[in-house]
Image (spheres, rainbow, N blue to C red):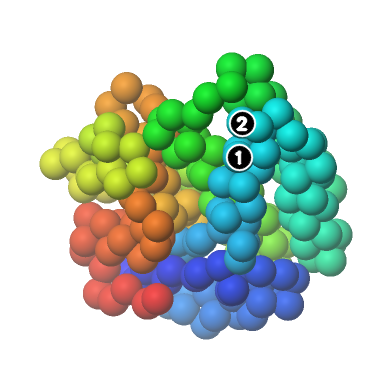
Amino acid sequence: MIVQKFGGTSVGGAAPIRRLAEIVRRALPRRPVVVVSAVGGVTNALFQSGEVALKRGDWRAAHAALAAKHRTILAELGLDATLLDALLDELSGLLRGVELIGETTPRTLDQLASFGERLSVRIVAAHLARTGLAARAFDAWDAGLVTDSRFGGARPLPEAPAKIRAALDGFQGVPVITGYVAKDAHGHVTTLGRGGSDWSAAIFGAALGAEEIQI
C-alpha cells in the first residue's frame, strides 16, 4: 500500500485532475490511498472571505467566486453540478454567522479553512469514480484522524493510528482523504497548520504501514 498526496496545483483544474486520475490508476496494484489539498489558492480565499465577513463587507461575492471556481471544475469534468451544493450552503451559513457575531475564533477559522479540502476531495473522488475506479471521498475525521484542540496547529492523539486503521479496514476501493484537517475528541474541526496536507499523508502512511508516501 502507498499514500499519494496531491497538492493544490494537482487539483487546480480539470486537466490536472485528469492527470491525477491517471497517476492513481497506474498505482492501483500498490493499493493507493489518496490525500488531497484544497484547490490552489482556495485556503487563502477562505481566510479572506472570513475577514470580509468580519468587517461586514460583501462576503457573498467572495463566496460566489469560490463556488464558481469549483463549479467550473465540475462542469469541465462532466460531474454532477449539485455535488458541492450542501457544503457551499454550509460555508455560506458560517460566513453569515461571522458577519452577525462580528468576531472569529481559532476554532471558527479552522472550520472555515476546512472547506477547501472538503470541496476538493469530493471532486477528485467523483472524477475517479466516473473513470471507473471504486473511489470514495473521506473527510479525515471519518477516516479516523483525531487530534488535540490546538486550533491552527493541532497534533494527532495517540489513539489516532488505531482509529485510522479501524475506519479504513475492509474498504476495497481508493480512499480519497482530506489533507490538513481533522477533528478533536469533542467533534470540533481542527487543522494541522499550513502545509499540513503533507503531514496528513505521513500520519495516514504511518498508521496504515505504507511502503511509500509520494508527495
Instruction: Locate residue 196: give its quadrant.
Output: bottom left
**Residue at left offset 77%, top offset 57%:** 69
Of residues 99 and 210, the one nearer the viewer is 99
Residues under numbered marks 2 and 1 in contact, where contact means CB atoms less than 8 Å apart? yes
> Which label was assigned to residue 51?
1
Q: CA distance from mark 2 to mark 1?
A: 5 Å
Q: Which residue is mark 2?
A: 54
Query: Which image quarter holds the C terminus?
Result: bottom left
Would residue 122 be visible to someone looking at this image?
no
> 10 above or below 112?
below
Label 2, secondary structure: give it: helix
Q: Residue 77 at x, y = what percent?
A: 79, 65
Outermost residue toward the top in this view: 101
Label 1, secondary structure: give it: helix
Of residues 128 and 77, the one nearer the viewer is 77
Q: Residue 59 at x, y = what percent?
A: 74, 37
Q: Residue 141 at x, y = what percent?
A: 39, 39
**Residue at left offset 65%, top offset 32%:** 55
Q: Is residue 129 left or right of residue 166?
A: right
> 141 above or below 130?
above
- For label 2, count other residues whose C-alpha is less than 10 Å away and answer few (under 14), some (14-19) or many (20+): many
Instruction: Locate residue 143: give its quadrant.
Output: top left
